[in-house]
Amino acid sequence: QGRLVESGGDSVQAGGALRLSCVASGYPYNPYSMGWFRRAPGKEHEGVAGITSGGSTKYAESLKGRFTITRDKAKNALYLQMNSLKPEDTAMYYCARVNSGWSSLLDPGRVDAWGQGTQVTVSS
């Protein structure tokens, strides 16, 4: 059974930075696209950033320039560097395997495996 395990969530002040990590095990994730999604209380899942197996990336328009997604295939790992955090970034962040190419990287409907989530809280 495959697993995605996130870490790195924390409580920070606005303007701070966090780096989320996700380690995949038990399933071949390297051939797949991977992504970070988030869900704020009372809202639906939102695509944050995605990366294809070939390394092409895609970001939510509102987050461009602040967030960076990377992956390390040798470690079966996915990362999200988040800078200049804002209170509206507060959410549970999920690592996910995305059954899609670049065009649908941020579509939660294309996710076929989710991690358990890591909480990010940004205070003003």
Image (cartoon, rainbow, N blue to C red):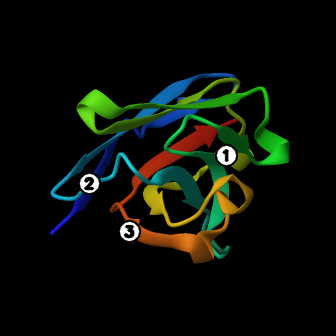
Q: Residue at x 39, y 66 (%)?
A: 114
Relative placement, left or right, of 118 versus 15 is left
Label placed on residue 28 = 2
Distance, label 2 to label 1, CA atoms, is: 30 Å
Q: Secondary structure at mark 2?
A: loop
State the residue position of label 1.
89
Location of residue 67 with respect to 107 vertically, above or below: above
The percent coordinates of residue 58 (x first, y second) are: 71, 43
Up-down relation of residue 41 to residue 24 (above or below): below
Label 3, secondary structure: give it: strand
For the residue labelled by badge 1, is the local secondary structure a helix, a strand or a loop? Answer: helix
Which of discs 2 and 3 lies nearer the camera? The answer is: 2
Amino acid type at circle 2 is Pro
Q: Earlier in the sequence, mark 2 or mark 1?
A: 2
* Image quadrant containing the N terminus: bottom left
Q: Are marks 2 and 1 in contact (CB under 8 Å)?
A: no
Q: How far across and how far down the image is residue 77, in percent?
A: 33, 36
